[in-house]
Amino acid sequence: MSASSATATPADIEALADSLSASANALHERIMRAIRRNGEQDGTDAGGADVGGIAHADAQALFEQEVALRQQANSLYVDSARLATAGLVVPSAQLLDVATRARETIRRIDRAKDIAGIVAALLGLTAAVLTAKGKEAAAALEDLKDNLDAYKADSRKPDDGHTMGA
């Protein structure tokens, strides 16, 4: 993929779809790990560290976001050639870099509300790409970056009790 190209190619759009699918996989792993933690008897691991679980409502909401990510990834696969010719104003390399950053954040994030915000921003970006609206895609990309930056700053704060466990 060319980092200097402002127009996404079909391969670029497919790579974004791959990244969304990988984010959905990472989200699913985090949800399932937290659900398994709900079944642990004392809420701590062998070393005494809190492993926390997830509330049913939080798990359900995150599962719904996972499904939405997968649906948008599938739409990107189907429409990749049409979307590439529509000419996005957001450089495709930047889209993929931020999508990768979101996926990696989802993999290591602990708080359900932070995951939900990042996934919602990722879904917003994908929706803008799917509709081939360049200005909205640029704004959605900035929103996702802001969410990722906010998480990074927020991760230094004490836990509010709504963790998913590591």
Image (cartoon, rainbow, N blue to C red):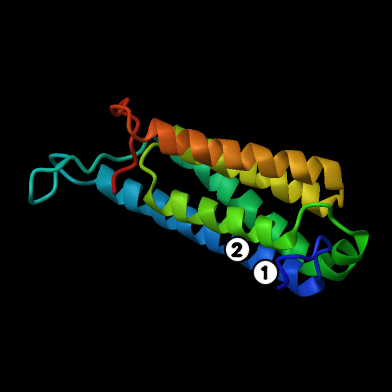
Image position of 148 (left or right of 122): left
Image quadrant assignment for residue 55: top left
Image quadrant assignment for residue 65: top right
Residue drawn where x is 33% and y is 33% of the image: 156
* Depicted 137 relative to depicted 12: above or below: above
**From where the camera sits, is residue 112 visible?**
no
* Depicted 136 relative to depicted 20: above or below: above
Graded by Cα atoms within 10 Å as few (under 14), some (14 to 19) or many (20 or more), the crowding at tag 2 reads many
Q: Position of residue 36 (x, y in %)?
A: 29, 51
For the residues bearing labels 1 and 2, Cβ distance under 8 angstroms: yes
* Residue at image mark 1: 15
Amino acid type, residue under disc 2 in the picture = Ser
The secondary structure type at the circle numbered 1 is: helix
Residue drawn where x is 67% and y is 56% of the image: 94
* Depicted 3 relative to depicted 65: above or below: below
Image position of 148 (left or right of 95): left
Image position of 138 (left or right of 51): right
Q: Position of residue 71 (x, y in %)?
A: 69, 56
**From where the camera sits, is residue 144 visible?**
yes
- Seen as rendered, the residue at the extreme front is 4
Amino acid type, residue under disc 1 in the picture = Ala
Which label sits on residue 153? Answer: none
Residue drawn where x is 32% and y is 28% of the image: 157
Graded by Cα atoms within 10 Å as few (under 14), some (14 to 19) or many (20 or more), the crowding at tag 1 reads many
Which label sits on residue 19? Answer: 2
- Seen as rendered, the residue at the extreme left is 47
The secondary structure type at the circle numbered 2 is: helix
Calculate the distance from the C-alpha at mark 1 to the C-alpha at mark 2: 6 Å
Q: Position of residue 115 (x, y in %)?
A: 48, 41
